[in-house]
Amino acid sequence: MASTTTRSFTALYDCCKHNLLENPKHILYSILFLSCFVWLVIRYLAQSKKPQLRRDNSPDLEKPTTRPRSTFKAPDRGPGEWIPVDFERPAASPFPDWNVHETKPLPYRPFKYGPYHITMGLRTMQWDEWIELDNHYQRFHGDKQRRIDERGEKCCRTAPEAYDGAVELLEELAKSNIKSLPRCSYLPQRYPSLFQSTPTGIHNLLTHENFDITAQPLAEDPMQMAARLIQDDLAIMFEKPDGQYYLLAGAILLAGFWRLSDKFGMPLSEIHTSGDVPGFKSKLEKGMMNFFRRVQPGQPVLRNNYFIQVDDSLAWSHSIGSEDSTAENGGLQAEGWSSAEKNKAIAHHHFRSERQSLRRLPRSGGVVFTIRTYFEPITEIVKEVGVPGRLASAVRSWGDDVARYKGRERYGEVLLEFLDGKHREQVEAGLVGEGEEEKEGKYPF
C-alpha cells in the first residue's frame, strides 16, 4: 500500500510540475496564495495569545447609567416622603500612618486646560474617604470654635423637622459603643489616633473634649457638635411635598463667600439662583434635581470646585465686604465682588478649593453635604510643576458669566501676569514644554 501511495504522490507532483512550467502565471498565484495563508495563520495565533484588556468607562453620574444595576431597589415613594432603608455604611479602615501633626493636606488642583465646561462634576466616592483630616486640624478647630462663640445661630442651625436627620449625621460620625448603637462610628475607625469611642459618644484625644451624643436634649445643636469634630462644613437638604429639597440643617462656619443665614430654609433651586450660579437654569437645574431625587444611601459621590480669593481669611473673605452687610444697607448682597479692591498685589491672592461629598442618610432621607475647604497662597502652589500654565489656561477659559461669578475682573490682570511669568520660568528650566498642554495629573489633583 505504501508503494501505491508513493506512486500516486509522484504522479500528482509530476502533473503539477508540468502545469506550472506550461503556465508561469500559476507559479505567481500559488506564491501569493501561500503568503496570504501563512500571514493569516500567524496573525490568528498572535491574537489568541494576547491578553484581552477591558476598559471600564468612568460613570457619568449626571445621566442615567446603562451599567448593571445594584440589587438594592429603592422603595416607591411620593414627593416629600421617605421610607427608612436598612443600610449601614461599610466600616472604615484606619488611614495609613495618619498623624495630626504631620499628615499634609491633599493637593487638590481641580482645574484643567480650557475650555471650561459647566457641569455638576460628580464622581464616585470610596467610603473610607468620606472625611479628610490633616495637620491643619488644630487651626480649623480653633477657627470653628471662635466662629461659634461670635456668631452662634448665624452659622449653625437645625430646623425642628430636620432634627432627627442632624442627629443621624452626628451618630454616623460619633456613634457611641453602647449596645443600643450597634457599631462604632466613622471617626474612631478612620482616625483612631485622634478619636476614641466612649460609652456616651466620642473623645477627642488632641483637644481632650468629650462629646455626649446620648443626652436628651443634646448640650448643643447636633450640626454644631458634628462640625466641631471635623474640618468640613456641613449641610443637610430635605425633600418637601412640592418635590423641592430645602436647606434645613447646617453648620457653615468657614464658607468664605456665603452665609447660612441667607440660605437657610431655601429650596435648592433658589439657593443657586439667588447666588447667580452660572448656567444653573440652562445646564444644571434639571440634572441636579434628578440626582437629588434618585440618589440612594449606598451611592455617595464627590465633587470639587475652586476660587481665587484676594485676602487671607479662611472663614470669611472680607475683601468682598463685611459679613454682616445686607442689600438694604448697600453692603454685601448689593455689591459682592464689585466692592473688592482691584489688582491687589499677588501676595494677597489665595487659591481656595472645596471638596464636597454628597450622600443620603438611610433613616431620615436627608442628603448630606460635607464641604472641606483647602486654602493656600497662590505664591506656593505655582512651585508645583505644570500648575502655573494650567491654572492660567483655566482662568482664561472662563466664560463671561463664570468670570463675573468668580470675580476675575478684580484680580485677573495681576494673577495672569504672575502665572505666565512662573510658567515661562518652568519652560526655561526644562520642567514643562513650550506652548503645549502638559500632561495633567489624575483629576482633581
Image (tube, helix red, strand yellow):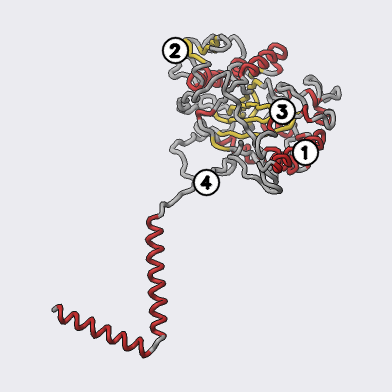
Q: Where is residue 179 in the image (x, y as percent from the top left)?
A: 42, 14
N-terminal-most mark, 3 or 1: 3
Q: Residue furthest front?
A: 429
Which amino acid lies under the numbered mark 2 shown in the image of this protein? Answer: Ile
Mark 1, secondary structure of its residue: helix
The C terminus lies in which quarter of the figure?
A: top right
Tell me: 191 left or right of 118.
Answer: left
Q: Position of residue 152 (x, y in %)?
A: 69, 14
Tell me: 115 left or right of 44.
Answer: right
- Which residue is the site of mark 1? 416
Foreground disc of the pair 4, 3: 3
Mark 4, secondary structure of its residue: loop
- Which residue is the site of mark 4? 57
Q: How far apart are marks 4 and 1 (CA)?
A: 35 Å
In the picture shown, does residue 180 fall above or below 96?
A: above
Which amino acid lies under the numbered mark 1 shown in the image of this protein? Answer: Leu
Mark 2, secondary structure of its residue: loop
Q: Position of residue 425 (x, y in %)?
A: 72, 39
Q: Residue furthest bottom?
A: 22
Q: Which mark is residue 234?
A: none
Foreground disc of the pair 4, 1: 1
Q: Distance between the residues labelled 4 and 2?
A: 43 Å
Identity of the residue drawn at 65% across and 38% down: 385
Which amino acid lies under the numbered mark 4 shown in the image of this protein? Answer: Asn
Tell me: 354 left or right of 36.
Answer: right
**Disc 3, disc 2: CB below 8 Å?**
no
Which amino acid lies under the numbered mark 3 shown in the image of this protein? Answer: Pro
Q: In which quarter of the image is residue 137?
A: top right
